[in-house]
Image: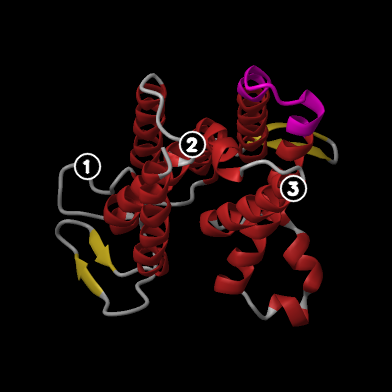
Amino acid sequence: MLLDLDPYVLRWGPLAVRWYGLFMALSFLAGTWYLVREGKRRGLEEDFLLNLALIVIVAGVAGARLLFVAANNPSWFITDPLQVLRIWQGGLAWHGGLLGGFLAGWFYTARRGLSIHRLADLAVPGLALGYAAIRLANIFNQEVLGRFTDFWFGRWPAQPIAMALALVLLVRYVYLARKGPPPGYQFWSFIFYHQLLRGAIEESIREMPLVVWGMESVRFGLGFFTLAQLATPPVMLFAWYFMQRAKREV
């Protein structure tokens, strides 16, 4: 989706605010607001919930950056360590953010004697909105582009499609919340279906290098297999295990 858009919200001397950073900050705020509101309804302290949100956000960003660098520019760890810290120049990996945020949240809640699975359910709206917001910001940055096809539209609109997938899962969350699912089911099912949709649809139409068994359809603009697609089955299996475990613990 190539449009003539300015990646900056504003520029004033050395001060520059990008749409990418703005959308990320707004998604953090929305996710934190929902976590605190619903957590307080469940009898949890506001300070604990705010601390949890801050810890998960910081660990999530750190994990996302570290995995991106490890997968794309591992030499930076030795040759240019400061470049690893320059997250404002782009480069975050979804799987690393999930892992970093979940591990930090699990450790913090375990110290308080609480279940991470029950609280993780409250993180789903923030995750879904965050994913959709970042894909919207990718349009302004002219990145995460779709593959070319022989269809009339030329290039797959990868970013809007990814946004739509995340918003569909957000609607699913709201629908299931009315049915009172068991603790943990909302979070792990979100991970399961998000990975399924991302691996099968988004990564197939996205212009990404093929790492193993490279197969590409120029006519339809499809490609297999990217690094994210290879990581999809084990992540889905892990999430499926905890989905079933949540059902059994009702």
Q: How many C-alpha atoms fall within 10 Å of the one at disc 2: few (<14), some, or many (≥20)?
A: many
Quadrant occupied by the N terminus: top left
Locate the C terminus by quadrant.
Answer: top left
Question: Would you say residue 11 is visible in this rendering?
Answer: no
How many numbered markers are drawn? 3
Q: Position of residue 228 (x, y in %)?
A: 41, 64
Between 19 and 194, which is closer to the camera in this rendering? 194
Is 52 situated above or below 143?
above
Give, as a three-letter code, the residue at label 2.
Pro
- Is 23 inside the magenta-drawn segment? no
Q: Is label 1 in a helix, a strand or a loop? A: loop
What are the residue bounds of the magenta stretch? 37-50
Q: Which is closer to the viewer, label 3 or label 1?
A: 3
Q: Amino acid at mark 1?
A: Phe
Q: Earlier in the sequence, mark 2 or mark 1?
A: 1
Does residue 129 sit above or below 227 in this rendering?
above
Q: Residue at x 34, y 72 (%)?
A: 210
Query: In this figure, which residue is indicated by the disc labeled 2?
Result: 183
Disc 3 secondary structure class: helix
Alpha carbon separation for disc pair 2 and 3: 18 Å
Please tell me which residue is depicted at 34% across the width and 31% down the height of the picture: 168
Residue identifier under label 3: 108
Name of the residue lying farthest toward the front = 249
Residue 42 colored in magenta in the image: yes
Residue at image location 60% in from the left, 36% down from the top: 119
- Few, some or many residues within 10 Å of mark 3 (<14, 14–19, 20+): some
In terms of sequence position, does the residue under pointer 3 or pointer 1 come before the other?
A: 3
Residue 54 visible somewhere in the drawing: yes
Of residues 142 and 216, the one drawn nearer to the viewer in this rendering = 216
